[in-house]
Image (spheres, rainbow, N blue to C red):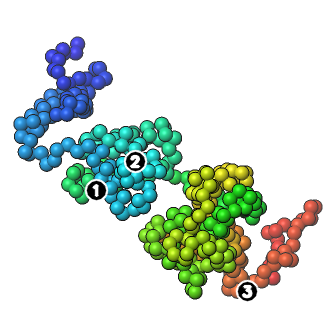
Amino acid sequence: MRRQVSKVRGIFERPKGSDIWWISYRDLAGRRHREKAGTRGMALALLDKRRMERRQRAKLPETLRHKPVPVRELLDLAAAHIRVHYSTKRISAKTGTWATDSRYPALLAAFGTADAASLTPQQIEHGLSKLAAEREWQPGTVNRGKAFLSLAYRLGVSNGLVSVNPARLVRQRREDNGRLLWFTPEQEARLRAVIREQWPTHEPEFDLALNTGMRASEQYRLTWEQVDFERRQIAIYKTKNRHPRYIPLNQATMAALMALRPQSDGTGPVIRHTIRTKDQAAQKARHWFERAAALAGLGEYTWHCLRHTFASRLVMAGVDLRTVQELMGHRTLAMTCRYAHLAPQHQLEAVERLAAFAGVQSGTRSVTDDFPTASKGSGDSIKDVRIQ
């Protein structure tokens, strides 16, 4: 018979009969906590320890390093940091939230009221997974949300609000960046026909993106002071990876710039629309371009596909990946290598050079053109062929 033990408030056995004991207690804020202790004696000792810690915090508040800081305060700190150091167009000056992005308010709703010091990596992972399910976030969006939360904690550590950054321990989601959409000549012709019919004033912007590979933010922030017609290049100072780059101007780019020049006095933004339609949203690249792509039967294509097209056509034209990396402004060559499969002919030429080198070393000759083939019924086989 199992000996009966007296019940003690705050400890319990789970599962029953396993002799595995847990403790249950509340902190100063009234939040309930449960911890696995082990044996019953260990549970009693741990419960006494937690209650002593709570009494010390209540009676001796001067021993506490910081008062509880909600995650909302850290998120607001991160929003202010982005407003100062990054593009102000993405932050609402009125509310301080991300004007065109849903991650900030989503994180605020999920973690805003939690105590920043007590938030665990497991809770962050659970909250991000819940947001991904509710808002249909892709892995990349979840990673951006995790990065924003990690930035908030880093700033909190720098300002002495918290001591650790639990978001650092949350694993990144695997992003599927394998698919690259780029325009074939036939698709470009269909899209260009729609643009000429519906939005003819935007065609120079289309050509500018197609022949320079600039990101949308770089192109629509471009000023005439960055364009050097004498050297035939565009200087991009504010880039995604914070490294300036210089883009040469081909004939198509020069023609696009000449078409845009009459719209301004040669100073200020390169792209400035003087004709306003009733549909003001059409003045923004994302809106008019996606509508044009839909009319051309290319609904899944976005403005960024023009950048992919620029890189893809360079690789297919035989331009080496190192040069493509410089023109694209990629920080690492690994980003550019995503386009390497578009140049199979050049890869074939590379291995053919290896075969030629091996032939020189061994004294053999190439027999690509006169290699014998075995016909049906013959006794010859490839293993019987001797290279002279």
Q: Is residue 11 above or below residue 224?
A: above
CA gap, disc 3 and disc 1: 66 Å
Q: Is residue 138 above or below residue 332?
A: above
In the picture of the structure, the residue carrying the numbered disc 3 is: 363
Looking at this view, is 370 or 77 the one in front? 77
In the picture of the structure, the residue carrying the numbered disc 2 is: 104
CA gap, disc 3 and disc 2: 67 Å
Q: Earlier in the sequence, mark 1 or mark 2?
A: 2
Residue type highlighted by circle 1: Leu
Write the residue at 61% across / 61% down. Answer: 275
Residue type highlighted by circle 2: Tyr
Q: Earlier in the sequence, mark 3 or mark 1?
A: 1
Write the residue at 91% across / 65% down. Answer: 375
- Label 3 Cα neighbours within 10 Å, binned few <14 / some 14-19 / many ≥20: few
Location of residue 295 in the rendering, given as x and y in whole percent from the top left corner: 71, 51
Which residue in the rendered view is the most extreme toward the top? Answer: 1
Question: Residue 155: which numbered mark, if any?
Answer: 1
- Which part of the image, by quadrant, shows the C terminus? bottom right
Write the residue at 37% across / 53% down. Answer: 93
Location of residue 377 in the rendering, given as x and y in whole percent from the top left corner: 93, 61
Write the residue at 47% across / 51% down. Answer: 100
SS for dot 3:
loop
